[in-house]
Image (cartoon, rainbow, N blue to C red):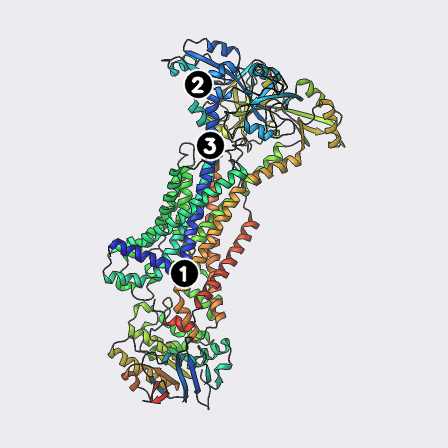
Amino acid sequence: MRDAHPSPVVRLRDVSKAYPGGASVLRGLHLELTAGEYVAVIGESGVGKSTLLNLVAGLDAPDAGEVEVCGAPMARLGDDQATLLRRRHIGFVFQAFHVLPHLTVLQNVALPLALNGLSADHAVVMLAAVGLAAKGQRKPRELSGGELQRVAIARALVHRPALLLADEPTGNLDPATASSVLALLRRQVAATGAAAILVTHSALAAASADRVLRLTSDGLVPA
Amino acid sequence: MTAARLTAALAWSALRTQPGRSLVAALAIAVGIALGLAIHLINHSAVAEFSRAVASLAGEADLSLRGRMPEDVFAALAGDPDVAVASPQLELRVNLPGRREPLTVLGLDPFRAAALAPQLVGRPVEAPDGGRGPAGGGLALLEPDVVFLSPAALEWLGLAPGDRLPVQVGVATRELRVAGSLPAVGAGRRLGVMDIAGAQWTLDHPGLLTRIDLRLRPGADPAALRARWADRLPAGTRFETPGESGERGANVSRAYRVNLSVLALVALFTGAFLVFSTQVLSLLRRRPQLALLRVLGLTRGGLFALVLAEGAVLGLAGSVAGAAGGIAIAALSLRLLGGDLGGGYFNGIVPALSVSPGAVAGFVALGVAASLAGCLVPAWSAARARPAAALKAGDEETAMARVRSPWTGLACFAAAGALLSAGPVDELPLPGYAAVACLLVGGLALMPWLTARLLTLIPDAWARRPVAGLALTQLREAPGYAGIGLAGVLASFSLMAAMAIMVASFRVSLADWLDHVLPAQLYLRVGGGGETGFLAPADQEAIAATPGVARADFLRSRALSLDPRRPDVLLLARAITRDRPAARLPLVGDPVPVPRDAVPVWVSEAVVDLYGVRAGDAWTLPLGGQGLPVVVAGVWRDYARQHGAVAMAMEDYRRATGDARVNDVAIWLAEGADPGRVQAALRERLGAGEGLSFVEAGELRRISLDIFDRSFAVTYLLEVVAVGVGLAGIAVSFGGQALARLREFGMLRHLGFRRRDVDALLALEGALLSAIGVAAGLGLGWLISQVLIRVINPQSFHWTMDTAVPWPLLLAVSAVLVALATLTSVVAGRRALSVGAVRAVKEDW
């Protein structure tokens, strides 16, 4: 699903964001991310890590500065255009898995393919890639937390997005499972050639990235 | 904090977190209680007023002899050694020129009545000059043309003592002098009192009595007196105690009142289902929270009590508000419409509102019970849930597994079938109503199973687009959730459809019946529903000989008492030939042959039900002061008289009674005759101004159907309320489901669903679900309508009808319901998503 993007997949220029109460969360952020690059963003709670992901995904708008994803200036996109960009070029992994309980595992993974009008065949391949080939017809309630996060990773990458956004993907997992999920995530991102932003508290998770940035009140700085 | 206080605090906080849905559920209960209580209070007030009127007529009598009888019965009875005082009465419904409703006039002996019912003795008003002015003095009590009117009658007629009251006797108008009032007669009762001899003479019923009130000597046994006189009384008369009279009067309208009350409780029933679906959805959404409470140490019993406490709060709030509303509605209705409620049973009675605290408390308790009943299954299910499983997301449909089984629904249907084979209880179709309730509960219980089956019938090819595919998958995988959401709409729409089919069937059958019983072009009635207007033989000859009249069929109608415990039936004597009775009567089944020397009568379906006679039976009618042997030659359908009617040939009637008067005339016009000119000619020949009323067949048909529609106005109103409650149920259900799926919508937005994709998803789900609900509602409604048509109506009103389905109405309402449900679903989703996709995926609960 990925196009050739000679320009950075993600570009943030002097991005600032404050909450409605007036408290400034992000101030003067700069970031460039090229295809295949795997970046971890760490920082204290409340510093704005998730807000950063929402700005990149077009789910929130900056107060100042520019956000470009796959060359598209997010501020100039309407809600529908931003949604379509997200549908085609971005994959999400959440801390709380967020799989649809009434769909089978395979149906959950195939959801982005269906949204993009693509054949569901690749969902089977993706499920096998995350080690759940035998559980495609199971319901999510029959899976463990680690397995659910594997489903979420498969769903996030099944349509070969240019960018993966992962928000604390191992926050709900035990260390052993978290380790295996991170390895899987790293492997699959590499396999698809996507750029990835991993927001995490975990030093273990951050260690799996190519580059680790710390988000502070002064912006993104190398950790 | 005690366990009870903890339970109350948790219940209150749960209700407060979803105030909109709690309010709608409480409102649904309130509507049901308000309607039920209002109808109860109106009926109770009307019946109480009616009973007061009956009691005031009887006064202090121990026993009354009722029925049409000659005067010599009074002389014999007054001479009985056990009788201390006997007071004769002639009660007539007197026709008033220019008015449709007659006035009840009692002729009585003021001196004898003073001992038994002094409130019925008129109070003369002295003329201003102290002499015997137009109002009359004390002697006026005995004058033949003097009447005393109750305050309600004076107000109704716009008269004052001293005025003149024109009354119709035959086709002539006579004037009575209003000599005073009857201040002790109840405020709601329209009544006139005359001296009995004056009434017999002036109103042309010489020698006739309709009632003799008796006070027995101390120690005398009423039962012994009854037994002694049993064989000596004229046919058609019977002894009654005042209690029996009141009961008989109230029985006249009992079936109608019970039907209305049941209809009002439909709204409550729907409200209970609304509480049920609200609680189910709320509990499903809160499963992890409740599981956490269990993990923290809340017992199964404590959780069960918690959910029931929520229901009790909803029920109590709704019931108290509903009770206040019901009292207000009843007071307003009595002021604006009287106590009649469209049934026509309490015309002439203007009751005051009588509120019994017991009834109000009873209805409040009923509302709480309905709400608790709605909570019972969800509470039980929540208490039984295993906390470990309930803590996991996606466990909701597992909790619904029990609901998806068809067995409960099928068992309810089987119970309905068993109930339908039982007959009425105390002449009320209680098993029929119970069967309707079973069908409703069964239908609701079958809904999740049925929804799942129907959804599998939809080909996958129809849902290729991702939104459609997701909607179909969602519904297929969670039919329990969806089916619960449909409870409100199914309950209200099926009842609405059932009522619509029943009313349409009734109306079509009534229209056919009118076509059959109104074959002539013009109808002439002497006066309204009173007993003093009639056409004498000379008038009848004049009518038949009037130019433009090709043929005139005369009809004599009068009340006939066949059973002292029941209201009178109507005897109709008309031109019926024994060979072709179907030409005049809408027969049900074939007529049976009658021996040439026997007197044939044709009875209405009500007579078959109430008196147990069948076609071919030999029977005795109390006619002409003696028993007349007759043979039942056939059964006919009669929508005009639910207490029964007996038709016989005019010549047989005249031979048996010697009564040659008639009340109505059906007139066939000569070819080319102008109806207006014929009417004018008849008025000129008969010389009766406002006493004659002419109506053309088409007009009579229209008036009859208008009366029908008016009678069902209350029914239509209650139907609208039930559907409104059902729609509120859809809003509550879809709103609840949208909130419960908030995280799902948020995640879909992250994956690339546009807002309009989420709208489309919800619209598709709403449309599909409501279409299934409406289709199931139509099916269930048809089943319930058959119970109404074939069981409840015949048992309540003793008439049958043919089924006619009002497809245009039902399809229009179905389309509106599906459209509204779809819209509601989208609006609910939009409201839920207003929190934003980012926050939605962060929601933990």
Looking at the picture, how far across and down is residue A149, in whole percent?
32, 75
Which is nearer the N-term, disc 1 or disc 2?
2
Amino acid bearing label 1:
Gly
Question: For residue B61, which numbered disc appears in the image?
Answer: 2
Amino acid bearing label 2:
Ala
Q: Which residue is mark 1?
A: B736
**C-alpha span from label 1 to label 3:** 45 Å
Question: For residue B47, which numbered disc appears in the image?
Answer: 3
- From this viewpoint, is residue A141 visible? yes
Which is nearer the N-term, disc 3 or disc 2?
3
Judge if badges 1 and 3 mark residues of a common chain.
yes
Amino acid bearing label 3:
Val
Q: Quadrant of the N terminus of chain B?
A: bottom left
**C-alpha span from label 1 to label 2:** 65 Å
Label 1, secondary structure: give it.
helix
- Residue closer to the observer: B660 or B327: B327
Q: Chain of mark 3?
A: B
Label 2, secondary structure: give it.
loop
Q: Quadrant of the C terminus of chain B?
A: bottom left
Looking at the picture, how far across and down is residue B28, in whole percent?
43, 50
Question: For residue B749, which numbered disc appears in the image?
Answer: none
- Residue closer to the observer: A45 or B677: A45
- Residue closer to the observer: B765 or B83: B83
Which is nearer the N-term, disc 1 or disc 3?
3
**C-alpha span from label 3 to label 2:** 21 Å
At 39% from the left and 48% from the top, the residue drawn is: B441
B577 sits to left or right of B241: right
Residue furthest to the left in view is B297
Q: Chain of mark 2?
A: B
* Circle 3 crowding by C-alpha within 10 Å: few under 14, some 14–19, many from 20: many
Q: Chain of mark 1?
A: B
